[in-house]
Amino acid sequence: MTAVRHKIFVGLSGGVDSAVAALCLRAQGHAVVGVFMKNWEEDDRDGHCAAAEDLAAARAVAEHLDIPLLTVNFSSEYWERVFEHFLAEYRAGRTPNPDVLCNSEIKFRAFLDFARERGATAIATGHYARIERVEEGHRLCLSADPDKDQTYFLHRLTQEQLAAARFPLGGFTKRRVRARARAAGLPNAQRRDSTGICFIGERRFRDFLARYLPAMPGAMVTPEGRTVGEHRGLMFYTIGQRQGLGIGGGGNGRPWYVADKDLERNRLIVVQGADHPLLYHEALELESLHWITGTPPAAPLRCLARLRHRQPLQPCTLYRSKGHWRLRFDRPQRAIAPGQSAVVYLDGVCLGGGVIRRALRVPDAAEENRAHGG
């Protein structure tokens, strides 16, 4: 039987992952169109234009693969759907993850709409994730490379978005991707991976954020209220942070870490030692929940979760208490940061997740009983 061929728009970022994704789809016989998305209006304050370098790399890949390359600017969509939320979260003293919203609102919404208007059957990216098509819909599954798995950033996708998405690298390891790129002679086979914010790139983050939000310096204090330094603005710090505090060892030489933020009094709470008990919590409360199937799972549910990209999956129980979804971990978790995402998994499938509203210590007895189905 002849395989079904499709017109697929591939997001070409200039990196090796998206290049190999396009290579794989072209090898399968699909009509591949590369699309370079510019979603941030560059200025000249950083000394060079990263977007121009990325576009040049994407053009070189498209020429090598002999596929057309389109360019599109989603800057206004990115500002309205992602960046304004990003700033609001920092203004509220939280630590957001813009890459999660960037995927659900830009790469798999604005880009998908753009592709469909031009006759595409599907869109593809270089994400490390797998999609299983089953009778009841589509499942977002862990990739073959646990170190590169990106389902954490994709957990807010819908059934409609997954139906139109292709992840050619889901069964690849990063090493195999590099090898495939070299074997095919791709011009960016050795280009280093980007580690910057989605579309904004690699910048001095503190300087970048200060352009948009006024810094409000205040005191760094111990849990007992003793002042040990001054912070530059609560928005510049995240829970668990060690670097950049600018305070010494306080006599015992142990490093300081951010344990909490006192927004009302504009104080940064710091503690000494990576194992300080105030850095650990047994549970957390979620908000802005999204379930990939469209409906929440039956609770309580024994499952796995991760609180940051590349964190090993943590055994836990998902349950409801006092009208809120919560996760209770088998082991206390370090540096739970409000504003970040907690993503839930079961049997290798990403169920969805939510935004961390707050970290919790040992629940009360009734709550503990509900968490374990009692």
Image: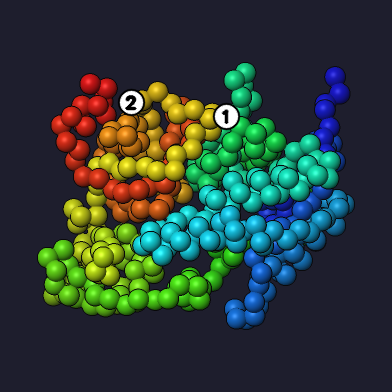
Identify residue for label 1: 139
- Numbered label attached to residue 169: none
Question: What is the x, y in percent for residue 54?
Answer: 70, 64
CB within 8 Å, label 2 to label 1 = no
Q: Is residue 151 above or below residue 35?
A: above
198 relative position to 75: left or right: left
Near-viewer residue (304 or 186): 304
Name the mark nearer the viewer: 2 or 1. Answer: 2
Question: What coloring was used for the rendering?
Answer: rainbow
157 relative position to 70: left or right: left
Question: What is the x, y in percent for residue 7?
Answer: 83, 39
At 27% from the left and 34% from the top, the residue drawn is 322
Near-viewer residue (147 or 225): 225
Identify residue for label 2: 300
Mark 2 nearby-residue class (10 Å; few <14, some 14–19, many ≥20): some
At 75% from the left and 38% from the top, the residue drawn is 122
> Residue 96 falls in which quadrant of the image?
bottom left
At 80% from the left and 40% from the top, the residue drawn is 120
> Residue 367 falls in which quadrant of the image?
top left
Question: What is the x, y in percent for residue 41?
Answer: 66, 69
155 relative position to 54: left or right: left
124 relative position to 333: left or right: right
Q: Can the viewer see residue 178?
A: no
- SS class, disc 1: strand
Count of marks overlaid on the render: 2
Mark 1 nearby-residue class (10 Å; few <14, some 14–19, many ≥20): many
